[in-house]
Amino acid sequence: MATTTLEPRTVAYRRSWVLDWLTTVDHKKIGVLYIVNSFMFFFAAGILALVIRSELAVPGLQFVDESTYNQAFTMHGTIMLFLFIIPALSGFANYIVPLMLGAPDMAFPRINALSFWLLPLGGGLIFSGYLFGGAAAEGWTGYAPLTSSQYSEGVGTDLWIIGLTLVGVASILGAVNFIATIFKMRAPGMTLFRMPIFVWTVLVTAVLILLATPVLAAGLIALFIDRNYGGSFFDPSVGGNPVLWQHIFWFFGHPEVYIVILPAMGVVSEILPVFSRKPLFGYKAFVFATIAIGLLSWSVWAHHMFTTGSVFLPFFSFMTALIAIPTGIKMFNWLATLWRGKLMLTTPMLFALGFISMFLIGGISGVMLASPPIDFHLQDTYFVVAHLHYVFFGGSVFGVFAATYYWFPKMTGRKLNEPLGKVHFWIHFIGFNLAFFPMHQLGLSGMPRRVADYSPDAGWTILNVASTIGAFMIAVSVIPLLINVVATFINGEPAGNDPWEGNTLEWATTSPPPPYNFDSLPPIHSERPLFFLTHGHGHAAARPEDLEEDPGDDVERRDGLV
Amino acid sequence: MLPPEPKTEVGRDVFNLYLVVLALALIVFVAVEGFILYAVVRYRRKPGDDVLPEQLHGNNTVEIIWTVIPTVIVFILFGASMITLAEVEARSDNPGVTIEVEGFQWQWNFRYPDEGATITGSAADPPVMAVPVGEPVRLVLSSIDVNHAFFVPQFLIKRDLINLGENGRNNELEFTITEAGTYAGQCAEFCGDFHADMTFVVDAMSRADYDAYMAAIVAGEPPPATGGEDCGTTIAVTAVESIQFDTDAIEAPAGEDFCIEFTNNDTSIHDIGIVDTEINGDDIGPGASITYVIPAMEAGDYTFFCTIHPTMTGDLTVTE
């Protein structure tokens, strides 16, 4: 009886790399797809920002008409939030969270791929309005009744609704996946209170997405029914209520602000300790502050609606101001992390420091707007535009760039060039402040947002010129980044496994990591297992009790846990 | 970093609240940014320094302290806001004038129910809301289409105009203007294509001037020029049929402001400008009238014309 021995195949099946990327379910490749896709939308929405700023530089209509202008700021806001900042941070989370947890992949790899591929589809649909008579032009907040078929006939608004709904579905799927991964895929020893802060912020963010995004989807579907099937959710002439849309939108929209900012706070909370060579000050306080922000975010939505006359002002004012407390705790903990550290001003560290100094301004102006009488003056003026850009751009986008420079070596095996990175940071930082700080004064002086033109007699021209120059500086600052990425791919400095002396598990594997992530894992006794490995036990634990369960001094031991 | 000088009583309250909040904001800003700069300078890692700093993990006492600090600030802010809010929301029993403000795409109707007058604006000719100084003015705000917002920066208040249907309760706004003058306002809630054209002017004047102004409006006559500008000399010019002025020569005094009361009885849009000067009045439509305040000019011979129809001209002689 003849027997045949089947040898395991030692060489992978050959596949084209295009097919490989299109069909991948590897969380790292999906993460990279997220990030690349997000940056392409960032450039598109950035061009729209330049259209807006060019038109506003001086009074009069020079470049575009009102309708084109309105489409530009609507698409700019929608794309920047839904297709750049959120997916970019989701991309980093996709890549990094399983690595930080010592997991081989996300819990649901195929759902992960689906939630990514819905994004270019949804974003493409939103943009495709330009091909069918004009994109949506009602502002990213899409207030009823301006979005009704009576006042916005074009199909662009329908495409905006459908596209956003798909993006929302993608977010919900992603959130489910993160929650399952974080609760069920942690390596042995990785207790909840040993998880890196970035993972904590992603967890709270995922819970917010899971609870908030379906509310937006419901609102969008109601709006679609109103527009196309004779519904009247928001039409007062047949018993609907246009203010209902604002409640629905902001019930989603304010948690959304924290969805955008919390993961960026997480990124910064990883970077500041590494480049201060100290642990994050007050790890547990930071975790509780993150959870507190997540909880409070459900009770503040109507602070966007103070001037509607339809909300109970003291409640929403008070709850909004309360958010300053956990946010203040975070700020103080970041400062205490710097205190008596040994700071290395690498590019990721510069962007992280930029984050805390710029987000501070957005936080302060947010507390000012929480006061209803002050909001009555500033609502819907450029002060609000300044505030939201200090939060989203000065905050989240600085966080995205910090993450880019920090994790690029892990993703590619090569470090981005430091001098070019610093050039990027400084042009970006100065341009950002030149573009957005003057908007505070413009708003205080009464310039409303979303106007295509303003009076030459209003005295707003000089500040608008400054703002436009700043916007172009931001655009220019992207050039060194692009050169840096290309040059690094061609001839970048090899990064090794752990170029920054990191604290967390992603630095324990190769750069880039193998498809299964880890050959073996170091022991996990604190939120800084890699620091543990490099510097021994004396310094490692966040809590003294972690040291007591210390298994021994063999720091070289690798447990082979996967 | 300040709002405009307030011209309403509630605006003063808001302004004072803003000063308190700004002071708190500046303290926090300087303290935190100052610390970041200090840390960056003071705690830089020296080249070759491989000794780890002390590994501080936290301290419950300082955590409690910096939980209390923002809590105190929040309560101060909230308390001060609620005191000012009560002032802003206060309503008088008997306002001096009530005006129904109705927003539409893309202009305003100002209805004076007591006087029986309605002023409708157009993009070319934004409406003027005449109000008495020193008396409570109440606005009842409604929209016939999308959302709008009534906003005059120098009043430091704003409120939305929302179409809530037949049974909806309209928003109200009440303020007392403290100083005569004209104040520019515009729609602050994005309302579609020509949102930026929804401008208007509030013209605050003495009670006597206000009564005369409204009497003229009700009678369908051009209202007397007001708003604090002093028209020493007023010249009437009318555009008549087939694109011409009713006069081909006017005179004005040198070295002082004067006014041109311009009435358009033609069938097309007209205005008045003065050749070789910056002076170019707003366009007005058929049947409308406007008062241009012309700043003091030097003596000499000038030509006035319609900037839309350059063949429509007349001589202006400015004499000492």
Image (cartoon, rainbow, N blue to C red):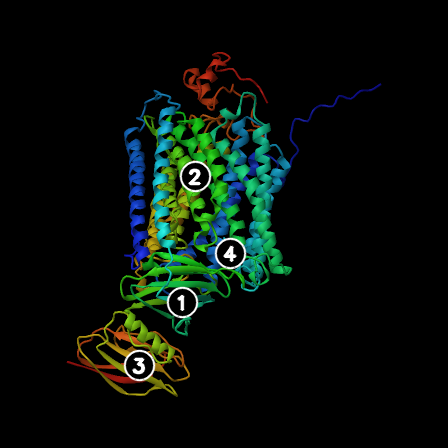
Name the mark nearer the viewer: 3 or 1. 1
Residue A312: x %, y % from top left? 46, 49
Q: Assign a secondary structure to mark 3.
A: strand
Q: Amino acid at mark 4?
A: Tyr
Instruction: Give the CA distance from mark 1 to mark 4.
Output: 27 Å
Are discs 3 and 4 located on one and the same chain? no
Task: Mark 3 vs mark 2: tell me if same chain.
Answer: no
Secondary structure under tag 4 reads loop
Query: Are both tags, 2 and 4, on one chain?
Result: yes
Residue highlighted by disc 3: B305
| Local secondary structure at mark 1 | strand
Q: Is residue A348 above or below residue B132?
A: above
In the picture, the disc for residue A399 is 2
The furthest residue to the left: B320
- Which of the two discs, 2 and 1, sits closer to the camera? 1
In the picture of the structure, the residue carrying the numbered disc 1 is B99
Q: Are marks 2 and 1 on the same chain?
A: no
The three-letter code of the residue at mark 1 reads: Ile
Foreground pick, B281 / A6: B281
> Badge 3: few (under 14), some or many (20 or more) residues near its Cα, within 10 Å?
many
Q: Give the distance between the C-alpha atoms of the residues marked 3 and 1, in whole angstroms.
A: 37 Å
Foreground disc of the pair 3, 4: 4
Label ID, residue A143: 4
Q: Is residue A384 among what the camera can see?
A: yes
The quarter of the image holding the N terminus of chain A is: top right
